Amino acid sequence: MSSDMTKMPDDLVSKYQRQLLDQAQQTYHDTPISEATVRAFLATPRHLFVRHYRERASKEWRDVNASNLTEHLATLYADNPVTLFGDDDDNVASTISQPSFVLRMLDLLQVRPGHAVLELGAGSAWNAALIGRLVGPSGRVVTLEIIPDVAARAAATIAELDIANVHVVSADGGDGYAERAPYDRIIFTAGTYDLPRSLYEQIRPGGLMLVVIKDAGGGDNLFLLEKVDDHFESRYAMPCGFVQLTGKYKVDTLDPGPVDALPQWSALKDKEVGLTEPSFRAFKTAKTDGAAKEHHYWGLWDADSASLVLARDDELISYGNAKATERLLRLIHRWVDLGMPTASSFALRVFRGDRPVTARDDQWIVKRRESQFVWSALPGQFADDVSQTSRGIGVRNTGGDS
């Protein structure tokens, strides 16, 4: 490398690596990090991939070089993500992810020597370099990065470290990379609302894909999908949190919109009919935004009854009539009774959007632009309440923006 970043004393780097590895093993004590992933981690020091960063909730950008590296090591080897690009914490464009979760994801992906792997979201290229270690000299990694400056830095790092089996491409990850397909494994390092159609053809039959699926209104879930015939089936899932894909697959409507954007708001805002104080604290959502002290709400609009309910702090505010409030409370109480499941509590199959798909009574279909998601309860999940509960939240084809 042009700097002396690689000449940091081995014992000091090893100390931080071992501390981080111990923490990762404690975090995932039920599923210990594999020996192959541990070897890849120890051989691929994280600090070599971060030259410019800031910590979350900080506005200060920090440059890392050989002369000041020791003062940054504790931060770079802490079990936290750090921001690589983007000044706004509410809309971070690129990060280097939480290390323990990166190692867990690599084990879930089951990368083997000789595999061809596609990564959507290069970031610092640390994850791609780890995968490069796992696939070995006979394997290959293509990592896509949509932000040109981030892609250039990632490519420069890979070149300086002489990592021959990792190829950084400045491109929209949603298109995949057909030039080097097919792939044995595909991994997303950013969340997506839809599953891009291009990926159905770029992964081998039986191949595995790790994808972070985002839901409108908030909530990310990591799914391990296997390519089965012409579709994908989930093999594992867990909640998580990732930045969103940018480019053509970015969705601007995932976050709640302003209440005054509702066409009905002008007619309802003066028709407040009362407050309800829930018996649980699931509605702790109000926050302030700078000097304006702007309150943020979320709520439910019931078109059949022309009723609206908004949540602020521990209050539900009803407008028009109480029908929306009653409906919201019924749904949330049912959700609480079920153990407050996330999307990862359900099995998932994903099909191309143009394929005819039907749902059983215990399933529901969510259609997005290029894919359709068929959700169902896992075996034994929710006991006898599955069908009834699913009908309560919509066992039917539902439209969705993409």
Image: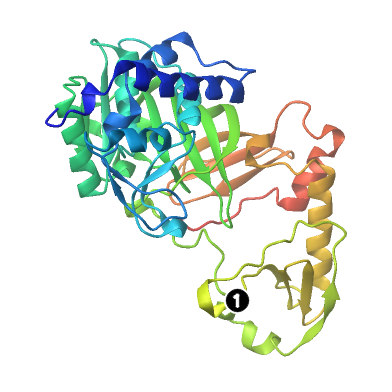
What residue is rendered at 53% in x and 49% in y? 367
Give the x, y percent position of residue 207: 42, 21
Give the x, y percent position of residue 221: 56, 40
Q: Amino acid at mark 1?
A: Val
Judging depth in this view, the residue of 4 and 247 nearest the camera is 4
Q: Is 182 displayed left or right of 109 in the figure?
A: left
Judging depth in this view, the residue of 402 and 250 nearest the camera is 250
Which residue is identified by label 1?
Answer: 259
Q: Is 152 displayed left or right of 325 in the figure?
A: left
Residue lying at the far left of the rendered structure: 2
Give the position of the C terminus as an image quadrant. bottom left
Q: Is 41 displayed left or right of 181 in the figure?
A: right
What residue is rendered at 48% in x and 26% in y? 105
Residue 206 in sight here? no
What residue is rendered at 74% in x and 40% in y? 361
Give the x, y percent position of residue 171: 23, 44
